[in-house]
Image: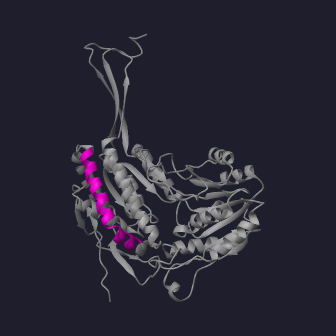
Amino acid sequence: MKKVKVYKNFINGKWVKSHTGKTFENINPADTTDIVGKFQLSDERDVNDAITAAAEAFKTWRLVPAPKRAELLYRVGQRLWSDKEQHANDMTREMGKVLAETRGDVQEAIDMTYYMAGEGRRSFGQTTPSEMMNKFCMSIRQPLGVCGLITPWNFPMAIPAWKMMPALIMGNTVVIKPATYTPLSVVNLIKALEAEGLPPGVVNMVTGSGGAVGSPMMHDPRVGCVSFTGSTAIGRKVSAACAPDFKHCHLEMGGKNAIIVMDDADIDLAIDGCLWGAFGTTGQRCTATSRIILHKKIYDKFARKFVARAKELVIGNGLNAKTQVGPAVSEPQMNTVLEYMRIGKEEDGAKLLLGGGRVKGGKYNKGWFTQPTIFGNVTNKMRIFKEEIFGSVVDLIPARSYDHAIQLANDCDYGLSASIYTKDVNRAFKAMRDVYTGIFYVNAPTIGAETHMPFGGTKHTGNGHREACTQALEVFSEWKSVYIDFSGVIQRPQIDNQ
């Protein structure tokens, strides 16, 4: 029997066991006989140790010149690049998505690391003339202290890097709780930081459940910021936990993203985009395409071609180069998706065009595989139209006109990502204006964000902050306005210069 490796928490520069002495198993969702590793089942005592270490490390890390912090991040990016293939294989084993996508996940972490390293010599403030004589005005950023990061399982290295790298370049220290389904990818990220000489306590990792680890982290008054990616329901709890201490709270939550395909669209291009948007990462993206709004003139043609193409998708273990769609990340996630398939079948008027159940037989019996599923004739009164599924299910929705399509796209509690396929540039620009989301694409699917653009959504998707780009610095810093008076006398703005 193969020996299963046991991984430890990372606190104050050391790999340590949890106070509970208990562990949990990380299981390959494509092959449940494959145990990726055992990880610490931590509790509030471990969280306290990590926050204490981070608070102490902040005293010196904040004083390290930002360009020097940047040099460390550059080296981390290089190390991640050199180990990219191994990290991708580890990620596919623990999360399930295909190797091409896990390579992209690691690359996104590399890109973010390099991008934020560049901010070590930027992080610009402003200088501005004073209204008074012999007086100088400027603004600068200052760090917050300890930042608590709670990260999801669908992008298990990219999203931790999205949060960690801007926090570090601003001079903050970090305590991160990885998703319980995908802790190994965060271990690999932290090992890269450790190997490049990150000082003890600057980054700490505690594994375990949200209740035992995440809750005490976000309630601790020593934590100045909590950045969370996950469900809207949990996001509300995070927001409530942060409110009493007025700590920075960044929430990136659900999506119910729509692609609009107009009657003048390149149908084959739109089908390519909808297949990738709907079934890439098995639909387990907050930006996944779950609603396809089709002009009535092309509805039948699109549906026929789309179903035929989806039937050809290869389902299987993501480590197989031929696989296009991997498993659900876990049995509970699979069961949630299967429940929505059942709901869709019972919706009055919806038509099941493809799939609708679990993939069974042979190798599939060892994993959590669901069929690519397409429902037709969906309306905005149906649950499968309104609720986030986070799996391999997509709706086809007929629209009478452009205005009707926009109305349908906006008829949603979420506002993360949307797209339109059209050859009419005027219509494309109108859609950019009229669809209320944080991300918008023209002639491309709802997935494909790049690290130098702000990432986030509107309505129940987020709370106004953004990840990536320079906008991420707003989450992990505070502005300080500085006035230097060299007049030698007391000067009173708005009074002495009337």
**Where does the magenta region start and end?**
67-91
Q: Describe residue 122's horizontal placement relative to residue 151 as left or right.
A: left
Q: Quadrant of residue 293?
A: bottom right
219 in magenta: no
Residue 99 placed where, x, y %? 44, 72
Q: Nearer the viewer, residue 82 or 235?
A: 82
Q: Nearer the viewer, residue 145 or 70?
A: 70
Which residue corresponds to the image point at 30% horizontal and 14% vertical from the top-left?
490
**Above or below, 317 relative to 18:** below
Colour scheme used in the picture?
A: one colour
Question: Would residue 306 be visible to someone looking at this image?
Answer: yes
**Above or below, 4 relative to 72:** below
Residue 355 placed where, x, y %? 65, 77
Which residue corresponds to the image point at 32% horizontal and 22% vertical from the top-left?
136
Q: Quadrant of residue 245?
A: top left
**Above or below, 89 relative to 496:** below
Image quadrant containing the N terminus:
bottom left
73 in magenta: yes
Image quadrant containing the C terminus:
top left
Q: Describe residue 490's horizontal placement relative to residue 337 as left or right.
A: left
Residue 237 placed where, x, y %? 48, 55
Q: Describe residue 459's horizontal placement relative to residue 143 as left or right.
A: right
Q: Nearer the viewer, residue 99 or 232?
A: 99
Which residue corresponds to the image point at 51% horizontal and 47% vertical from the top-left?
463
Q: Describe residue 27's horizontal placement relative to residue 385 as left or right.
A: left
Residue 36 placed where, x, y %? 37, 77
Question: Would residue 146 be visible to someone looking at this image?
Answer: no
Assign the magenta stretch its main secondary structure. helix
